[in-house]
Image: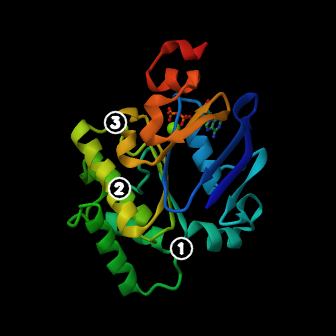
């Protein structure tokens, strides 16, 4: 279970997170929604430890990860939590296989053979069996997305954090990625946090939804009940009403 408590993050004068609290329960898929620029990516990067918060803490299976040493962080967090970045973020100078192998280096106890097997399996799970020797520039945008998911799942993390996995994809590819998220969830028994703008399809790939607005999580509910909420900000956002900006 991941517990986020009273997170605060400012960049200079820019207030991004004011007081964010959130719980990610084991086995669930939780989606965070919110306007562009509201701080969703900052929240996710703070949860994985890439951004240091100004206040609050993140408890990862009971351990406060905001105060760990580098080696404790590597042992307790990096091998068990993977983030799939909004931009894919594969290394251009390495083949897909090398990219994934690099991500696997956090699992120091693996033999070369075991790593090769995990790479093969991970690419198969995302439906990209034949790209091991290819470079990122040789792949389409959708393939890059899937390859970066393969890299994230290679070490078999308990937690997967997806930052806008379907944004910028055509509807068919977006549906494919949504299905991939569900099948990975089932096959690898992961717990996932997703940032998404795909309000229409949200119910298909997640159990719960939380809205980040004005530095806080202002509303949370079951994804199946999201269209029957009375919260005006939440309703305004999911229905695309411009009025919530004021
Ligand atoms: N490293 C940084 N330094 C300074 N400001 C930053 C940094 N990272 C993010 N910000 C600012 O924090 C705010 C929130 O950015 P963030 O990327 O989290 O938005 P977002 O909700 O993910 O938006 P989108 O839906 O467009 O991806 C923005 O004003 C952004 O300029
Ligand atoms: Mg973002």
Residue on which the image places disc 1: 106
Splitting the image into 4 quarters, where does residue 55 fall? top right
Q: What secondary structure is marked by label 2?
A: helix
Mark sitting earlier along the chain (2/1): 1
Q: What secondary structure is marked by label 3?
A: loop
Total marks placed: 3
Q: Is residue 164 left or right of residue 117?
A: right
Report x, y in % for residue 238.
46, 27
Splitting the image into 4 quarters, where does residue 245 fall? top right
Label 1 packing within 10 angstroms: few (<14), some (14-19), many (20+): some
Report x, y in % for residue 131.
24, 63
Residue on which the image places disc 2: 182
Q: Is residue 243 above or below residue 32?
A: above
Check mark 3 vs ligand 1: CB closer than 8 Å? yes or no: no
Label 2 packing within 10 angstroms: few (<14), some (14-19), many (20+): some
Q: What secondary structure is marked by label 1?
A: loop
Residue on which the image places disc 3: 168
Mark sitting earlier along the chain (3/2): 3
Q: CA distance from mark 1 to mark 3?
A: 30 Å
Report x, y in % for residue 113.
36, 86
Give the residue at x 31% y 49%. Answer: 177
Give the residue at x 47% y 29%. Answer: 228
Q: Which is more toward the observer, 239 or 64? A: 239
Closer to viewer: mark 1 or mark 3 = 3
Mark sitting earlier along the chain (1/3): 1
């Amino acid at each position: 279970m991941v517990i986020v408590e009273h997170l605060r993050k400012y960049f200079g004068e820019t207030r991004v997170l004011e007081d964010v609290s959130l719980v990610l329960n084991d086995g669930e898929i939780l989606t965070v929604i919110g306007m562009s620029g509201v701080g969703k990516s900052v929240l996710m990067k703070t949860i994985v430890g890439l951004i240091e918060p100004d206040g609050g803490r993140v408890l990862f299976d009971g351990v406060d990860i905001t105060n760990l040493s580098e080696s404790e962080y590597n042992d307790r967090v990096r091998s068990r939590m993977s983030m799939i970045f909004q931009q894919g973020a594969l290394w251009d100078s390495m083949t897909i296989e090398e990219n994934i192998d690099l991500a696997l280096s956090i699992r120091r106890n693996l033999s070369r053979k075991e790593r090769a097997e995990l790479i093969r399996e991970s690419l198969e799970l995302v439906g990209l069996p034949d790209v091991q020797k290819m470079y990122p520039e040789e792949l389409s945008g959708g393939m890059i997305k899937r390859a970066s998911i393969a890299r994230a799942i290679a070490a078999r993390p308990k937690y997967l954090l997806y930052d806008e996995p379907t944004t910028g994809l055509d509807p068919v590819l977006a549906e494919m990625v949504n299905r991939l998220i569900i099948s990975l969830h089932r096959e690898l028994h992961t717990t996932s946090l997703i940032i998404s703008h795909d309000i229409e399809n949200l119910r298909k790939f997640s159990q719960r939804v939380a809205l980040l607005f004005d530095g806080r999580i202002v509303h949370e509910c079951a994804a199946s009940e999201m269209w029957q909420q009375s919260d005006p900000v939440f309703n305004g956002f999911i229905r695309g009403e411009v009025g919530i900006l004021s």
